[in-house]
Amino acid sequence: MAFALLVSACAGSHVDEPESPLPSDERADYAIFALRCSKCHSLARPLDSGIDDDEYWRRYVERMRRQPASGISLADTVPILRFLRAYSRAQRKRKQAQMEPPADDASAPNARTPRVPGSR
């Protein structure tokens, strides 16, 4: 599930499409997220926030919904939250994959054997 997104640098000017295709079941959620959330700020604001806690997302979206200019209805919160949760999961998986050393890298030092200076 790839979520490499191009985000609009100018809030509300337009909504860029995802660089990689979203799974079909997430496209509608992304469309509502992009439409509503780009009205007041760039999509980078929530996507680069680092938020990955579902309860925090719920409070964040509710706070944004209460902004008069947002146009976010109570019904919009469900697909927006669904998209943000899926995006957060994908980001966590990507970070974990980047932190794990390759399993077949023979040149990597053994993590259990400390290297003593001057030894081979």
Image (cartoon, rainbow, N blue to C red):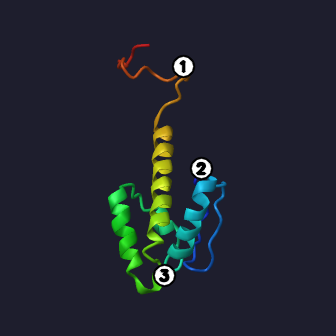
Instruction: Using the numbered discs, state the Cα–Cα distance from disc 2 to disc 1 in whole angstroms.
Output: 29 Å
Residue situated in front as seen by the camera: 62 or 20: 62
Query: Which picture quadrant has residue 9?
Result: bottom right
Q: Residues within 10 Å of mark 3 (few under 14, many from 20)?
A: some
Residue situated in front as seen by the camera: 111 or 117: 111
Task: Indicate left or right for 35 with 112 as reference.
Answer: right
Residue at the image position 46 percent from the left and 72 percent from the top: 75
Q: Quadrant of the C terminus?
A: top left
Task: Tell me the residue that label 3 is attached to.
Answer: 71
**Callout 3: helix, strand or loop?**
loop
Residue 84 appears at what percent x and percent y?
A: 47, 60
Disc 2 residue type (three-letter): Ala
Query: Which picture quadrant has residue 109?
Result: top left
Task: Tell me the residue that label 1 is attached to.
Answer: 106
In this picture, is 100 found above or below 41? above
Which is in the foreground here, disc 2 or disc 1?
A: 2
Question: If you read the primary sequence from the N terminus, does the residue marked by circle 2 or circle 1 appear first?
Answer: 2
Residue at the image position 57 percent from the left and 80 percent from the top: 12
Residue at the image position 50 percent from the left and 38 percent from the top: 97
Q: Residues within 10 Å of mark 2 (few under 14, many from 20)?
A: some
**Callout 1: helix, strand or loop?**
loop
Q: Residue farthest to the bottom?
A: 68
Disc 3 residue type (three-letter): Gly
Asked if labels 3 and 1 touch by Cβ distance under 8 angstroms, the answer is no
Residue at the image position 61 percent from the left and 80 percent from the top: 13
Disc 1 residue type (three-letter): Ala
Which is in the foreground here, disc 2 or disc 3?
A: 3
Asked if labels 3 and 2 touch by Cβ distance under 8 angstroms, the answer is no
Task: Tell me the residue that label 2 is attached to.
Answer: 2
Q: Residues within 10 Å of mark 1 (few under 14, many from 20)?
A: few
**Callout 2: helix, strand or loop?**
loop
